[in-house]
Amino acid sequence: MKLFRKRMLLVSILVSFLLMMSGCASTWVQQATEWTPKKDTPVLMGHYQVKSDAGADLFELAKQGVAKGPSFADVSEKTYKLMVTSLSEKFGFKIYTDKRRSKKLDHGPELTTGDKRADELIGSLASQWTQPEGADRAFHRILAGVDLRKTVVGTLKGNDKNEVFMSADLSINDVDAFILFKKFELKLAVEILDQNGVSVFKAKAIGATGLTFMRNPISEGRIEKAMAQALANLEKAKVEQGVSNITSM
């Protein structure tokens, strides 16, 4: 039994190392050559969404409902704060929200029960969360040269002519490993449009949780640690000059 545990520990260490290396290789940053952001560049966070393909975990839901354990919204909000802090410190962005402007991108009334805990439970069941001050509608995968980009920016514009507009999402993917083990792989995608609807910044970052036996809980700080890993990879990535219109996010 002890030999088995030692072997599994070695396997776990090896997998973690490989994940770290692959994360670095899959992480990149692109910035338009004509765009030179200065310290405290005003960036309106128009959209940020977290999605997981794992579905709801019954144990997590039980803890959330009975013991007020962390909801999917709680974990997602922490990833949002980590991203804002990292991008602000690394690239000098001053990231903020404006619900009044961002919600103009959406059509129809805001869907809510009016009860925070009920909304969080629904979000946990759906494994989806959208930053409440931003739009439900993403705008970071719109094809270059399409008028829709200009329409989005025209809707979001305020009085500041130096302001740019960010849209981002985080995918949390449930992955099986070695039959009985599981982990999450995180993929962060970010894009910024300027006042003319032109993409001036694109980034992609990869992170992963450690392995767990059978279950794959989002609690215990696992997602936050993986997000911190992804952002650390992003901070170390070399900034490529020029934004590609064909690079996959």
Image (tube, rainbow, N blue to C red):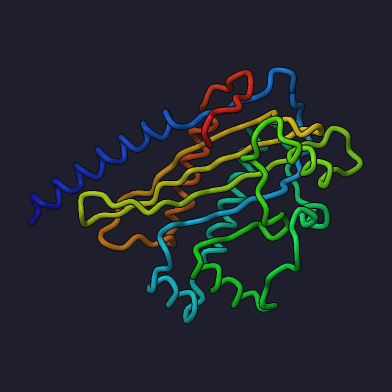
The residue that appears at 67% across and 44% down in the rendered structure is 139
- Residue 45 vs residue 5, the one in the foreground: 45
Quadrant of the rendered structure where residue 35 is?
top right
**What residue occupies the far bottom of the structure in this picture?**
66
The residue that appears at 33% across and 51% down in the rendered structure is 175
Quadrant of the rendered structure where residue 241 is?
top right
* Circle count: 0
The residue that appears at 63% across and 20% down in the rendered structure is 242
The residue that appears at 89% across and 38% down in the rendered structure is 160
Tell me where residue 54 appears, x and y as whole percent.
40, 60
Task: Relative to 222, say whether 73 is above or below.
Answer: below
- Residue 225 vs residue 189, the one in the foreground: 189
Task: Relative to 39, say whether 75 is above or below.
Answer: below
Q: Does residue 239 appear left or right of residue 56 in this picture?
A: right
Quadrant of the rendered structure where residue 20 is?
top left
Q: Does residue 118 appear left or right of residue 233 in this picture?
A: right
